[in-house]
Amino acid sequence: MKTHFAIALLVCAALVAACTGSHARTEIRVVEFWGMGREGEVVAELVPEFERRNPGIRVAVQQIPWTAAHEKLLTAHVGGSLPDVAQMGNTWVPEFHVVGALQDLTPLEAASASTNREDFFDGIWETSTIDGRLYGVPWYVDTRVLFYRSDLLRDAGFDAPPRSWSEWVRVCAALKAKSGRDDFHPMLLPTNEWPQPVVLAVNLGAPLIAADATAQFSEPKFIQAFTFYLDFFRRRDAPVVAGSQIANLYQQFGEGEFAMLITGPWNVGEMRRRLPAEMQSRWTTAPIPAPDGTPWPGLSIAGGSSLVVFERSEQKEAAWKFIEFLTEPEQQVRFYKLSGNLPARRSAWDDPTLRQDRELAAFRIQLDHTVALPRIPEWERIATAIFEQGELAARGQFDAVEGARRLDVRVDEMLAKRRWVLAR
Amino acid sequence: MNRRKLVASSILHLVLVAGAVATVIPLLWMVSASLMPAGEATAFPPRVLPSRPTLSNYEALFERLNIGRAFLNSAIVAVISTLCSLLFNSMAGYAFAKLRFRGRDRLFRFLVGSLAIPAQVAMLPLFLLLKSMGLVNTYLGVMIPLMATIYGVFLVRQFMLSIPDELIAAARIDGASEWQIYWRVIMPVARPVLATLAIFTFMSAWNDFMWPLVILTSDEKYTLPVAIANLVGEHAQDIELMMASSVLTVIPVLVLFFVLQKQYIAGLMSGSLKG
Amino acid sequence: MKVRRPAFGAEARAGLVFLVPAMTLISVFFALPVIAGFVLSLTDFDIYSLGSVANTRFVGTANYSGLVDNAVFWASLRNTLYFSLVGGPLTIVLALGAALLLNAKLARFKPLFRTIYFAPVVTSIVAVAVVWRFLYHPRVGLLNRMLDLVGIEGIDWLGDPHWAMPSIILLSIWKNFGYSAIIFLAGLQNAPEELYEAAQIDGAGPLRQFWNITLPELAPTFAFVTLITAIGYFQIFAEPYVMTPDGGPLNSTLTIVMLMYREGFRWWNMGFAAAIAFVLFALVFGATMLRGFFRKGVAR
């Protein structure tokens, strides 16, 4: 009798176990997420909260080293082994759109109560929008502003950073006159970086690439911006050096070998870490100066990373939930605190840590004035060509007009295939 | 005379030691830095030795970052591909060296010519091929390109040319089958070249980075170099941790070489002769 | 009369059977992808083709002729030649020197020294990159600290376009010389002892012995080492890639295989990248043919 009972009990237990087991298996959905480098690690710390709120979804985070992320994504796309969601640099979105890897997120976003288009910075939102359709939700942002030595500017008679281009030039002249050092340059414009000439060009509204995929560098607005850029070198306001030739940017900035440079948010953290304590009150940031006759501040470029869903994902709904979670203001603030990456949503910036940060204030202003770059897969190569020609012109091999003409030739060559595809 | 010998010996060892020191400094520094507490490797004024040696970096690797799993993956991949490579390459190398058939030498010359093809050109097509065979994210997918290589066949064949034909002829007269000749007569004689090939294959499998990264999609299958590359991205500041992970990758191959080096050199000895 | 005639059929059959596993693997997993790569090199296969295969055109040899006026390609070719022609001989000479020392009768602790010289060879390139990037660090790196001690101003090893390639060469020599040294050592141990004894009786000094016995005996080994070094160095990729992934500064460390890799896996220009690979193949193949002519000349 006892044994019968025991057997019955066992059978029941087994049945219950089997039922709950299979039940659980059908209910739990696994979303695969690929994060790059440090960000991948940080996401893993946000996941428990998401899983607590969504008991039916489990997120499997995989870290991909930045150095090989592009190769990995390419082969994974070709091999059909992409995850459900991934982080992707904004400039990669057009590439992966062209190969048909990305899910159109427009309808999901339209139906979502959490992602609020109005709350995202405009230029950043644009970077992941192609032909009016949304392919990625901005996660964190990156834009370029002016970093400057406030003490040196004050010594030269400027209590505030330059607000217009002509004032910018005057600041340079005053700094040079004040310094009297041979190795001093008011500006640093590394010749192997494209964002600086491009920032200047977008301020004047240069079109860069036309919709029919033809290069527009000989357009007067670009030539004007390019001339302004090259004049920094001509006047010796900036040295003709590549970033890689600068032994230690922070040390040289701290020692006052140059007083201004245009760079991104990661350098806020680096400057704080690497400059000695007594230097910390002597530098800060400012939005980009505006061309004369246009309202302050000037424009800058919109960069950063977006979250994308892959077209072949079978967990699009759950994947979207995870994106909603990662982009909600509260998580954006947590992410900033863990990784130092700037939030893409305005409301996240209301958090005191961000609002009260002196160096981030300029970024907050600048983020309302950014422009998305041409969204074509060739862009990174075109950007490389811009600084390559810029460097040759800065070394005095030819002038801005000839540089622009050469750019047109090279970029039109790169875009030949695109024009052919568009014409089909 | 004895005095001259002493002087010569001293000079010789002086040069040998100097060369060894120059060679080993980066590696020694790697070991030393791996035992330093965080931040000490980049401290100023510079430090050569840890102030107080600690194993905390190694503990962190195993406990926090689960490097043990990657270690095991690498071991599985390296051991199996080495065994397969030994079997397949030695069979082919033996055939090219000692078994006569039509077109043999032409085929061999063709193979040697293909050594000049950079392997990267085949990466994408190979990936597609393995994908269609369902081998993506499998150990087999990682191992397949290592199992039989032209260089391996070449190495074995060069060695086996020096094995006297009489040995094989005698075995044939004794009525041994071709497989028995290969397995019982040739393989024992070929031990040196097998050691060479074993070290070579193990080394490639253990150290390869790009291919496992591309073919493996889940991190519980990542091999050691891939796992380390992940670390580089996120812990580039933690030099001491990076050094500990480097030490872990180097040791197994170095031990293998130390044990097999006599055989390894003997294997190369006959191999290079008939280049 | 070594092998009886009737066995020939069985022997040939066995030979073919023995080839099957290796040759199957090599043809399916190497030759086939390479052929596919060659077909790609005759097309404009790129990112648009990945979206839809219809966006691919057969372009014949356009990818190859396009290389002729591609400045970056010529720069990468120059860098590769610079690397091979400077780094190759240095590696070989250093390897030979190390082998001669290790082979000296007076030398003690040979296994230890062999292992030390060989250690860089077995060190994973990922680990090497970690250590060397730190050694080359302009401020805290070991190299500049040592220069500092003797009063020389530090060099920005990897950042200065003039020093970047020499830095990569130095690293590559360190990493690779042990491999060739062990091969030389094997070759040296093959030289018959009697020759040296006879020379000693004739009163030949160590230099004469080296010139008249060691070098000629070592000729085949030398040829072999040159061949594998040439092939390896023309295809150099991992060493510069881990130190200067974008081939910088100013493309001064961009080698042919790095360019191929960048075009193929960074910009997705698979057709163009494949063409670069086959040009490199032709170059290396040509170089090894030259060596063949050279050897025939010497033999006569």
Image (cartoon, rainbow, N blue to C red):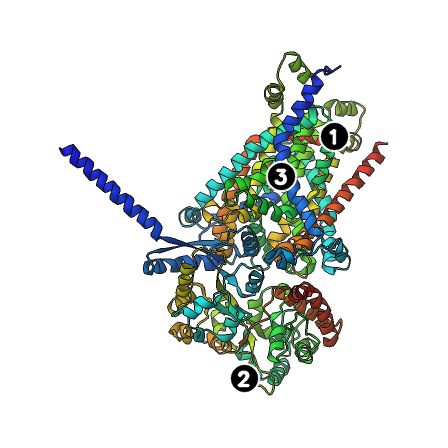
Residue marked by disc 2: A296
Amino acid at pointer 2: Trp
| Count of numbered circles in the view | 3
Q: Quadrant of residue A339?
A: bottom left
Specify few, some or many for label 2: CA neighbours under 10 Å numbering under 14, 14-19, or 20 or more. some
Cα distance in 3D space between marks 2 and 1: 77 Å
Name the residue rendered at 63%, 80% in the picture.
Answer: A176
The disc at residue C28 is 3
Q: Quadrant of the C terminus of chain C?
A: top right
Quarter of the figure with the N terminus of chain C: top right
Q: Which of pointers 2 and 1 indicates the residue nearer the eye?
A: 1
For residue B163, say whether it is visible: no
Q: Position of residue B165 (x, y in %)?
A: 70, 19
Q: Secondary structure at mark 3?
A: helix
Residues C53 and C280: in front is: C53
Measure how far apart labels 2 and 3 are at the Cα level. Answer: 64 Å
Which marked residue is nearer to the observer: mark 2 or mark 3?
A: 3
In front: label 1 or label 3: 3
**Marks 1/3 same chain:** no
For badge 1, the amino acid type reads Asp
Q: Which residue is mark 1?
A: B105
